[in-house]
């Protein structure tokens, strides 16, 4: 990975410090999870479902850390909407609010269970009926939010559009870990080694991407007015190179 692009265009002390702290905590939680699972493998007798450091524990410290990131992101978006008069970010506000509620109240699991039972979904392609229900949730709410994001994109100015693309790149990465790897987990998480790897990839990936979201939103607020380079251009530059 070429860091010269980031050093040249995204090198501010405040955002660098925030990103370093967030990623350090993310990596620490991932390593603790791996260590605890290793201890499970050597058969220490303990109820691991209550261990608060497991990244897959819905009530654990890593999950609470994710909630904090969501709240920070929502706060920054509200600042952009109210103080900076950037109404295009309303769609992103709805998206992150829904993601926070979904994480904390397990909307997609509940919806998946309800819709699979209501419409009598059958397992197919190696997926459980509930997995298909959860994909239905993603399709319905994803489509509604996509419409709002597209409308905001076309109504926004050039600066907002380029920022929107950068946010879209990160959100695609978040979907890859949260949806794509989750589906792979259903297929291949059949033994303890693949289960550990895919759990760390899914939950650890989501944690890191959400930290990048915090970093990018903070940068959007503090970036110099003369700064006219955007995150997505890194990938275009690398492709052209």
Image (cartoon, rainbow, N blue to C red):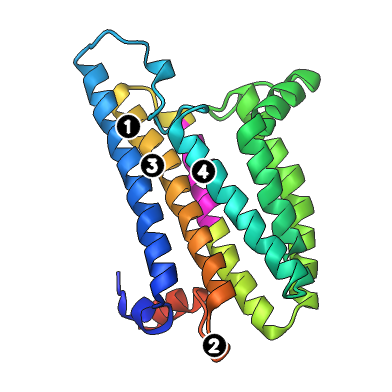
What's the distance in space between the residues labelled 2 and 1, CA to CA? 40 Å
| CB within 8 Å, label 1 to label 4 | no
Q: Nearer the viewer, mark 3 or mark 2?
A: 2
The residue labelled by disc 1 is: 33
Q: Which residues are magenta?
A: 172-185
Residue 184 locus on image (x, y percent): 46, 36
Q: Secondary structure at mark 3?
A: helix
Residue 105 locus on image (x, y percent): 66, 30
What's the distance in space between the residues labelled 3 and 2, CA to CA? 33 Å
Which label number is shown at residue 24? none
The residue labelled by disc 2 is: 228
Q: Secondary structure at mark 4?
A: helix
Find residue 155 and report its image quarter. bottom right
Residue depicted at x 39% and y 78%: 11
What's the distance in space between the residues labelled 3 and 1, CA to CA? 12 Å
Residue depicted at x 77% and y 68%: 82
Sequence-wise, the earlier of marks 3 and 4 is 4
The single residue placed furthest to the top in the displayed view is 45
118, 152: nearer the viewer? 152
Find residue 200 and report its image quarter. top left
The residue labelled by disc 3 is: 201
Q: Is residue 49 left or right of residue 106?
A: left
Vertical side of 87 occupied by 56: above or below: above
239, 155: nearer the viewer? 155
| CB within 8 Å, label 3 to label 4 | no
Q: Residues within 10 Å of mark 1 (few under 14, many from 20)?
A: many
Q: Is residue 181 magenta?
A: yes
Vertical side of 94 occupied by 117: above or below: above
Sequence-wise, the earlier of marks 3 and 2 is 3
Sequence-wise, the earlier of marks 1 and 4 is 1
């Amino acid at each position: 990975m070429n860091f010269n692009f980031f050093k040249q265009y995204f090198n501010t002390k405040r955002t660098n410090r925030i990103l370093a702290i967030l990623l350090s905590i993310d990596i620490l939680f991932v390593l603790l999870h791996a260590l605890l699972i290793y201890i499970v493998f050597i058969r220490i007798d303990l109820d691991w479902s209550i261990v608060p450091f497991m990244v897959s524990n819905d009530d654990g410290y890593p999950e609470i850390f994710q909630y904090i990131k969501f709240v920070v992101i929502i706060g920054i978006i509200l600042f952009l909407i109210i103080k900076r008069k950037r109404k295009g970010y309303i769609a992103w506000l709805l998206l992150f609010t829904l993601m926070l509620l979904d994480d904390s109240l397990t909307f997609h699991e509940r919806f998946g269970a309800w819709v699979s039972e209501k419409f009598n979904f059958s397992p197919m392609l190696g997926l459980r009926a509930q997995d298909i229900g959860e994909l239905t949730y993603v399709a319905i709410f994803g489509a509604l939010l996509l419409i709002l994001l597209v409308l905001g994109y076309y109504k926004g100015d050039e600066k907002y559009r380029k920022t929107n693309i950068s946010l879209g790149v990160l959100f695609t990465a978040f979907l890859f870990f949260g949806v794509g790897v989750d589906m792979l987990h259903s297929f291949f998480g059949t033994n303890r080694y693949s289960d550990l790897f895919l759990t760390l990839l899914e939950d650890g990936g989501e944690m890191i991407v959400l930290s990048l979201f915090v970093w990018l939103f903070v940068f959007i607020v503090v970036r110099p007015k003369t700064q006219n380079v955007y995150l997505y251009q890194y990938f275009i530059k690398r492709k052209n190179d």
